[in-house]
Image (tube, rainbow, N blue to C red):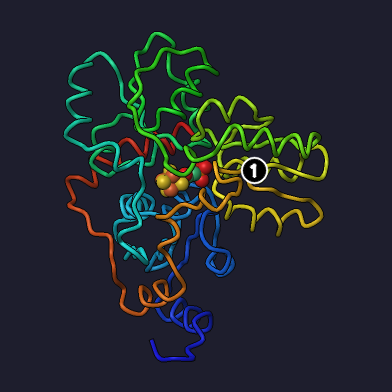
Amino acid sequence: IPQGTDLRAEIDRLRKERNAVILGHYYQKPEIQDLSDFVGDSLELSRKAAETDADVIAFCGVRFMAETAKILSPEKIVVLPDMDAGCSLEDSCPPAQFKAFREAHPDHIALSYINCSAEVKALSDIIVTSSSAETILSQIPRDQKIIFGPDKHLGGYLKRKFNRDMLLWPGVCIVHEAFSETELLKLKAQHPDAPIAAHPECPPYIVDHADYVGSTSGILQYAKTMPGDTLIVATEPHIIHQMRKSVPDKNFIGAPGADGNCNCNICPYMALNTMEKLYLSLRDLQPRIEMEEGLRLAAKKSLDRMLELAS
Ligand code: 13P
Ligand code: SF4
């Protein structure tokens, strides 16, 4: 990239030239959120990807999200600025092991969190996101046995809330796992009137202190309606950028990790996307998500079930 390139202007130029839409997750860097055509949670971004009439989707998020866009919009070119932008939950669930787990429990259906590979989606019956999991679970008959993967914390939260017996895959999100209960309680003691909002990927010792538990879009909505003027936010701290934009008169504090600050809770995968890499991905239309058609169709079944049941 030539020195002095105005990346923002070049991205805008390429977006028009390519008829591209830029989709950004709330965990992206502020400069990427600000230039995205749409910023949202996993379910909203899937819906946008399925609906768009753009020729190119530049997905500023992680690989399973860009794969979901490709599964739902196969005729589009889908680029991910950095192909190494994975997810610890996806890594925790190798398809061959998941297949064996399913086969060991033939009378169970597999409800899977969208944070998994296309192969695991193809082995699943219904996909859920954190914003749709409760609506979808409540439509599954109580006597239906369920395997839930790969996030044991989201699964555990749903089990407790709905009093349902589900078999959990033991995966975790390394980002939400890094919050410290001791540090959270110290912070709460300094701001006794501030409610705590937590993502359900957090361990139970964090979720149990929360006044609100929900997806990124749910937490953002809570920030707009919550009592008081200060909120403690137990999810990836880049979402605070969007909160400050939507609710400028309130104060948002990221929940701390063991070192007492919230920097250890930055998602290292999401952080791989940069303005430079976004520019290059629009210029070169690479790195591109490609998928074998048989796998795509198999994975699409469980995603279509999600889109049907979530609405
Ligand atoms: P949501 O935005 O759907 O709440 O998901 C959070 C997340 O961890 C994405 O990787
Ligand atoms: Fe995966 Fe956690 Fe990063 Fe989300 S925040 S992409 S669940 S590692």
Q: State yes or no: Cβ of the residue under disc 1 lies below 8 Å from any atom of ligand 1.
A: no
Residue 33 locus on image (x, y percent): 56, 63
Q: Is residue 6 visible?
A: yes
Q: Is residue 206 left or right of residue 196?
A: left
Instruction: Tell me if residue 213 comes above or below residue 47 in the rendering.
Output: above
Does residue 43 appear in this view? no
Question: Tag 1: residue type?
Answer: Val
Rendered-image quadrant of the N terminus: bottom left
The location of residue 239, given as percent across then percent down, is: 60, 52
Above or below, 213 against 68 in this view is above
Q: Which residue is mark 1?
A: 233
- Return the x and y of residue 263 as percentages of the image width and height: 55, 53
Q: Tell me which corner region of the image, top left, top right, bottom left or bottom right, holds residue 120.
A: top left
Q: Residue at x 23, y 41 (%)?
A: 119
Residue name at image x 64 percent, y 58 percent: 241
Res 208 quadrant in image: top right
**Label 1 neighbour load within 10 Å: few <14, some 14-19, many 20+:** many
